Amino acid sequence: MKVLRSLYLAALTGTLALGGSAQALVFDPATGVKGTLQLPDGRSVSYTGYEKIFYVEQVEDPAYQYLNIYVPEGAGPKAPIFLRTYVGGYMASAAAAPQATDASGRALAEGFVVAIPGTRGRNSVIKADENYAQAHPGVSVGDEIYTGRAPAAILDLKAAVRYLRHFASKIPADANHIITDGTSAGGAMSALLGATGNRPEYEPYLKAMGAAAEKDDVFASVCFCPITDLEHADMAYEWLYSGTSSRQSLDEQHRAYSQELAALYPQYLNSLKLKTPDGKVLNADNYLDFLKAQLIRAAQLAKDAGAEIPQDIGFSFSSSARGGFAAPVDGKAPTGEPGAGPDKSKDGLPPRGSPQLGEYITALDLAPYLDYVVSTQPLKTVPAFDSLIAGVNEPSGENGEFGDASGSNVNFTAFSAGKNDSEVSAEVKTNLSLLNPLHFVDDKKTAVAPHWYIRHGARDRDTAFTVPLNLYLKLKERGEDVNFLLAWNRPHSGDYSLNELFSWLKEILKQPAGKAKK
Ligand code: DHB
């Protein structure tokens, strides 16, 4: 099957015909179908939907490689385009209609043209037909071909962006204002769309697929809990969590793996040469203080909005200092109301009541906080993303993502490959880099989206907090406009706080495309 894979790649890079059915790219306004979407707030939006539009000429997987476009009533050539990807778990994702309860429906109601592309993913398969078998020596008619292993999904999404740009004037919509949105692996895809605009590394693949010969940079990228930087996600995870009590209860072998992985991360973190948004050097020695500040900011925002922050998850509050620190932001002194906590009159100071609305959070002890995160959802195994011996141990989804068209599961980190007495192949390394926005954002030549909205739940343990934070910091350092928050009390989820998101979109859309940098 290795032969199969290299032939498949040869096909992709244009030295062989793909063997799929070829068809010209078209957008036919006459195919529009009218519909109405009812939003939870009672709003009703009428639209014209254009469905099942293939976005490449060489369609390899007709179940996925098409997009749906919805144009709300009244939209014209200035309508921004909201591209929602439903990729999750690096799996295939079918094109869909806007959903009343997520950002796609909301976007439609706000006058955006909504585009929802399907994409191949790690589990999409086709049966080889005669054409395919002919174009791929070693493949027989009827063989199962995995169509969506890395980097297929991002190629499909880029092809969809190019399609939208190609036909924007017919749709009609403003291709200079494409906003992408996704969650988790879909958040990673949105991040990639934002971070890899017009990069030549994707060009040969896109050309072979018959994508429109257009640019593929976008105006804004909305990323909820992006599961990205897969090369380093395992070490990041253990660096953050190896000290938690749940990791102490692992068997000796896995505890050792956890510590081994954790020890690998500082070197990588330092190699990123990060800076805080106000320009201070950030490295493995002071990064946790930065993380704490981000978590305190998240908790404080929530607290000021009325949320109760539990007493026992590591935060200190200004009333603990009882007059010694600073007045609460509502101007009232900490009072020590009836119902005082366990420290009642212990030290002769006024007893402490439940924390007051407006109180300051003064500090965070990270150890109990991380234990709290883990108490809301158990940690992933060690390693969190790769598996130790792909094909022997239970493979992870990501092992499949980096496998080949035969459906193989493949190690993609030096750590896990090493435990299997092997190495990460050059091909897998290429695919990893094509899936990692951090590889491109440092390069001034990349057409990076000028606007970013990145959210990661403050109790989301699907990847380490450092993963979205590093993306944020790199984008900030580049001078992009980044709205970042570890959203308080959010688990691994997306498309929340839509009022806030759409207010932000309204603001950025007042700015001309490509003019975000200060
Ligand atoms: C997703 C979640 C994960 O924990 C992961 O490893 C990959 C993808 C997801 O929800 O898309």
Image: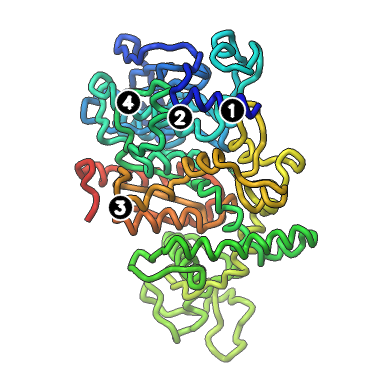
Name which residue type carries label 1. Answer: Arg
The dot on residue 481 is 3
Q: Left of 22 or right of it: where is 261?
A: right
Position of residue 510 measured from the top left corner of the image (x, y, whole percent)? 21, 43
Which residue reaches farthest right? 251
Tell me which numbered mark, 3 or 4, is placed earlier along the sequence: 4
- Seen in the picture, residue 135 relative to 81 is either above or below; the reply is above
Disc 1 vs disc 3: which is toward the camera? 1
Quarter that holds the C terminus:
bottom left
| Residue 99, picture quadrant | top left
Q: Which element carries disc 3, helix, strand or loop?
A: strand
Q: Give the amino acid type for the residue marked by disc 2 in the picture.
A: Gln
Q: CA distance from mark 3 to mark 4?
A: 24 Å
Packing grade of label 1 (10 A; few <14, some 14-19, many >=20) is some
Q: Secondary structure at mark 1?
A: helix
Which is more toward the observer, 175 or 147? Answer: 147
Say whether marks 4 and 1 touch (CB < 8 Å): no
Q: In 3D space, how far apart are the residues under numbered discs 4 and 1 (Cα atoms)?
A: 30 Å
Ligand 1: which quarter?
Answer: top right
The residue at 51%/68% (across/down) is 284
How many angstroms separate mark 2 from mark 1 (CA)?
Answer: 37 Å
